[in-house]
Amino acid sequence: MASRGKATILDIARKAGVSKSTVSLVLQGSTLIRPGTASRVRKAIEEVGYVYNRGAANLRKAHSNVVGMVINDLTNPFFAELAVGMERVFQSAGIVPFIANTAENPVRQGEVLKSLLEQGVSGLIVSPAHGTLPDAFERIRSGGTPIIFVMRRLAESRVPVVAPDNPWGAFLATSHLIGKGHRRIAFLGGFPDMVVYHERVGGYREALAAHGIAAAEALIIQGDTNRKGGMSAIETALAFNPAPTAAMCFNDAVAFGAMTGLRKRGMEPGGDFAIVGFDDVAEAQHYMPPLTSVAVDTAGLGERAAHMMLNMIRAGTTRAGNHIGAISLIVRDSCGPDVTETRRSA
Amino acid sequence: MASRGKATILDIARKAGVSKSTVSLVLQGSTLIRPGTASRVRKAIEEVGYVYNRGAANLRKAHSNVVGMVINDLTNPFFAELAVGMERVFQSAGIVPFIANTAENPVRQGEVLKSLLEQGVSGLIVSPAHGTLPDAFERIRSGGTPIIFVMRRLAESRVPVVAPDNPWGAFLATSHLIGKGHRRIAFLGGFPDMVVYHERVGGYREALAAHGIAAAEALIIQGDTNRKGGMSAIETALAFNPAPTAAMCFNDAVAFGAMTGLRKRGMEPGGDFAIVGFDDVAEAQHYMPPLTSVAVDTAGLGERAAHMMLNMIRAGTTRAGNHIGAISLIVRDSCGPDVTETRRSA
DNA sequence: TGCGATGTTTGGAACGTTCTAATGCATAAG
DNA sequence: CTTATGCATTAGAACGTTCCAAACATCGCA
């Protein structure tokens, strides 16, 4: 019975002795149908194990209750948190979020985007993969599908963005390091083709300048924004002479990697070298030593992005203002005690 | 042009001066169409910015190229890794995996499952949320949709499972602890309504028995299978007198939590108390101290599950054999040096 | 010239839903 | 006893695709 061809609205209409229109009405909870009829229909639905065919429905309705969230790296707990933050909002708004991972690969991102679009998503929230070209997104946007970027933005793009205040976060973090007495401070991780990179390096530079410290370009070390990137970046940093005594990291993953790298060289993060991260992932407070980091209110940003998307969908527009989230520096132990004057000049 | 109503196969047919059937054929790469015609059609497609409507297509075709992966906790890196492992396989098989997170909530899981089904997925890979009842899945299965469980299984369910060799893993890990000289060994985390729990506790018990150690029921401490659960479990464990000197943890997240808990009490994991985890997440080797853990070949399990699903879809069956993956104990520093006889009796 | 074979293209029905307009049927109003 | 008013239900066309069967074109060959 259930095995050959799924049951349709028509089957259950027959079973309940009504027309398909009535069943459809019941399905969408119309108040038009008399309660008695409605419950009879519902019983039939239950009995047949009917599953609604949203594809067929969308064919007529043209708005689809599913949005896509395209994430560049789901194995980074930060993005995982972000994703579940958004998911929560969508779920309670009755719309279904599908998560897709691009593994920082623009080609894969293209495929994923295509699939989502073909599936008829009514909106897209994207954290673009490293190396993405903006035109694909412009095309989607001008095609009428609401789309917004989270965390990352693209240089020449007019897609609305939800992101933390990167320059200010980096400024605060770097200033903290300077306040501890450090003067040779490295910046680890990220690539110049990411806007976020410029924002964070910018904040770092400004902090140095504000304290009259000349930025040493050689201490700005590019690299992948994950643990491995952090390990090799710190390696490079320590090879310089004189070596830096502290590092501002592109994000927490890089910071964790840098810490591991330090230990490999027999140095203890916090004691021998100060590290500050960015994102303040859940792990940061449990790490050894607990990581000083820029908290960006991950869940809050996710929720904000989701709400923005909801509004865009409701309003049927592809435009919206940007949102720059407030940040705060969470001081823990990874920067150790203040560095003394004598040590600094050593 | 693009703004009012998306372009359809018919629009592009008009544009290319052919029939809709021809366009459809081109779209599915049929060799029937003359190359010249095909490229003319393709050009038209490009020009209009046409996006394929998979919903409409599935209406006729009845098999859908999308599978759903339902994960109980995406913020646990272990499951994130598992998900991307599966994703890779699916992607290269030309089918689109949608990831959904249930946040360990059976109600949410129900909603997610419903949505996925309505969307017309051709298969489902699920890591069931804690507290799930099996009947929902049995219904899906008997409805003809291939479904398999990963990592977790349900007691009374006949759904195929891909999981690591839990009993053997726990046996090995516990034996390692015993070999180090520990006799009072706690088991931390998990709940008895999870099959995995029984498997792992079972292995733990067997190891104790094999070495003639009586299991102390009070040292088997239930709790959430995340960091927080680990923190409170170790708390409970240490309150006993005599306190245990080592713990086998349900998974790495619990182990990390337990380590944090130890430090809170002024004890150093590895030195003062031995900890072993389960899963061997990427983080384990970078932790302080590096965590001894049971490696389950996460990516491998994910790939295996994905391939199994692919086969089921191709064969049009809802049945398949279980797969129990081999495990191996990765010894690192979290169990410290051997405990001496005198210390053990202290 | 007619015929089959081969290769390319096409019309139209079908898929499962929504939605508009129309229907039937009470009841209330005139 | 009509006629309007409201409520509950329904027929049928649409949505964008696939696929079958049929049509058309071209060709070689008797």
Image (tube, coloured by chain):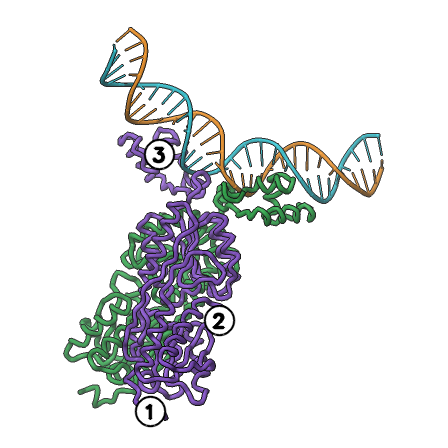
Chain colours: A purple, B green, C cyan, D orange
Chain letter behind tag 3:
A
Question: Residue at position x 37%, y 74% from top?
Answer: B283
Question: Residue at position x 24%, y 84% from top?
Answer: B272
| Amino acid beneath label 3 | Leu
Residue situated in front as seen by the camera: B88 or A198? A198
Instruction: List the residue tagged with mark 3.
Output: A25
Would you say the residues marked 3 and 2 are in contact, meaning their CB atoms lie under 8 Å apart?
no
**Residue B117 on image: x %, y %:** 40, 48
Image quadrant of residue B100? bottom left
- Judge the density around disc 1: few (<14), some (14-19), many (≥20) Cα neighbours within 10 Å: few
Question: Residue at position x 31%, y 31% from top?
Answer: A32
**Residue B336 on image: x %, y %:** 30, 85
**Residue A13 on image: x %, y %:** 38, 32
Chain letter behind tag 1:
A
Question: Residue at position x 33%, y 66% from top?
Answer: A296
| Amino acid beneath label 1 | Arg
- Judge the density around disc 2: few (<14), some (14-19), many (≥20) Cα neighbours within 10 Å: few
| Amino acid beneath label 2 | Pro
Helix, strand or loop at label 1? It is helix
Whether marks 3 and 2 lie on the same chain: yes
**Marks 1 and 2, how far apart at CA:** 33 Å
Helix, strand or loop at label 3? It is helix
**Marks 1 and 3, how far apart at CA:** 78 Å
Total marks shown come to 3
Residue situated in front as seen by the camera: A180 or B265? A180
Q: Earlier in the sequence, mark 1 or mark 3?
A: 3
Query: Relative to residue A119, is residue A242 depicted above or below?
Result: below
Q: Residue A192: which disc?
A: 2
Nearest-to-viewer mark from 3 and 2: 2
Q: Earlier in the sequence, mark 1 or mark 2?
A: 2
Instruction: List the residue tagged with mark 1.
Output: A343
Would you say the residues marked 1 and 2 are in contact, meaning their CB atoms lie under 8 Å apart?
no
